[in-house]
Every structure is written in structure tokens, then in C-alpha cells.
Image: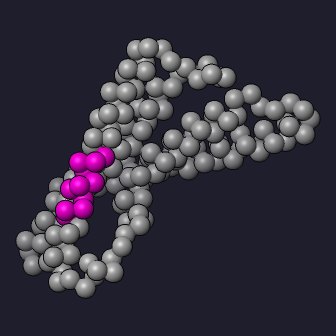
């Protein structure tokens, strides 16, 4: 289990690097668009491109944020419970997250295949939309796998106490 978890963590880090690159690209596109507007030459499709890059940032940063435990967690009540019950609550929350993000990943995959088949493209840039939807499916899928291992880890902790 530790072997697979190590590779999932590496994948999460790799996805996060892509998310960071997308943030830099968003900054560059936005800055270039603003500068070109001074010369009355706005960058065509800048709004679309920033939107597409935003999907990459959000979906590819999910797994790393989960690895770093960077998501918002309300622990006022749970922190006062015995540690064994805390692990049980964490396992339950991870399981619910697994189901939710597994469903999101599956539906995004189905939607991306449908959009690919229809040949839908963006309005201004005429860029295919489906690769970004596949990115959402990949990011949510990786998060789902990480949550599966998190659930199993919390169940093991709960049983060991």
C-alpha cells in the first residue's frame, strides 16, 4: 500500500506543477492582453484561454492540496472526540469524498467523450474543449485514488487503537 501511495503522491506533485505552470500562463496571457489593449490591439481569445487554464489550475491542484491537507476542515467538534472516533470520522469523510470525486471524474469522462464526438470547439479560438474536460476527469480521478488510500489509512489507524 505504501508503494502505491508513494507514486500517487508523486503524481499529485506532478499535477501540481502543471497547475502552477497554468497559473503562470494565466498571468502572462492577462498581462499581454492588458498591455496590448493600450495599443488598441486586445489579445483575441484571452478570456477563453484564461478560463481554460483556470480549469487546469483547479482540477490539477486538487490532489496536491489533499496530500498537503490544505482543504478547509472544521475540527472544532471532532477534535474533542476520542482519537479512535476522529479516525473514524476522517475515514467516513474520505469515503464520501471518494464517492463524490469518483462520480465527478466518471461524469467528466463521459462528457468529454461526448464533446469530442460532437467536435465542439470554443467560440473565438476554435480550440477543442474536450482536452480540458479530460483534465478535470484526470484531476478528480487522481484525488479519488488518493482518498481511497486515505480512507484505508484511517481505517487501519482506527483498528490499531
Q: In this view, does 121 lie above or below 61?
A: above
Q: On the picture, is 85 further left or further right than 80?
A: left
Q: Can residue 150 be seen in this view?
A: no
Region of the chain picked out in magenta, as a range: 91-101
Query: Residue at 37% of width from left, 37% of height from top?
Result: 137
Image quadrant of residue 156? bottom left
Q: In this view, does 42 lie above or below 59?
A: above
- Image quadrant holding the C terminus, namely bottom left
> Is residue 99 magenta-colored?
yes
Image x and y of residue 70, in percent: 42, 65
Query: Residue at 16% of width from left, 59% of height from top?
Result: 152
Task: Compare residues 47 and 68 and report the one nearer the observer.
Answer: 47
Image x and y of residue 39, in percent: 92, 35
Q: On the picture, is 115 further left or further right than 48?
A: left
- Image quadrant holding the N terminus, namely bottom left
Most extreme residue toward the front is: 77
Image quadrant of residue 97? bottom left
Most extreme residue toward the right is: 39
Q: Can residue 16 be seen in this view?
A: yes
**Magenta part, dominant SS:** helix
Most extreme residue toward the left is: 159
Q: On the picture, is 143 further left or further right than 33?
A: left
Image x and y of residue 111, in percent: 37, 27
Task: Compare residues 88 and 23 and report the one nearer the observer.
Answer: 88
Query: Residue at 23% of width from left, 55% of height from top?
Result: 96
> Is residue 23 magenta-colored?
no
Query: Residue at 50% of width from left, 18% of height from top?
Result: 120
How many tags in the picture? Answer: 0
Image x and y of residue 139, in percent: 39, 43
> What is the basis of the colouring in this image?
one colour
Amino acid at each position: 500500500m505504501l508503494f502505491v501511495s508513494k507514486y500517487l503522491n508523486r503524481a499529485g506533485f506532478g499535477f501540481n506543477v502543471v497547475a502552477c505552470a497554468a497559473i503562470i500562463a494565466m498571468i502572462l496571457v492577462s498581462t499581454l492582453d492588458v498591455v496590448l489593449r493600450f495599443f488598441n490591439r486586445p489579445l483575441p481569445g484571452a478570456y477563453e484561454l484564461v478560463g481554460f487554464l483556470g480549469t487546469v489550475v483547479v482540477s490539477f491542484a486538487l490532489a496536491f492540496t489533499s496530500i498537503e491537507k490544505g482543504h478547509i476542515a472544521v475540527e472544532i467538534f471532532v477534535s474533542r472526540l476520542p482519537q479512535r472516533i476522529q479516525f473514524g470520522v476522517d475515514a467516513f469523510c474520505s469515503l464520501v469524498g471518494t464517492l463524490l470525486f469518483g462520480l465527478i471524474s466518471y461524469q467528466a469522462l463521459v462528457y468529454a467523450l461526448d464533446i469530442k464526438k460532437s467536435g465542439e470547439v470554443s467560440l473565438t479560438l476554435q480550440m477543442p474543449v474536450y482536452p480540458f474536460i479530460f483534465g478535470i476527469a484526470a484531476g478528480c480521478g487522481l484525488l479519488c485514488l488518493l482518498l481511497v488510500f486515505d480512507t484505508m489509512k484511517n481505517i487501519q489507524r482506527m483498528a490499531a487503537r
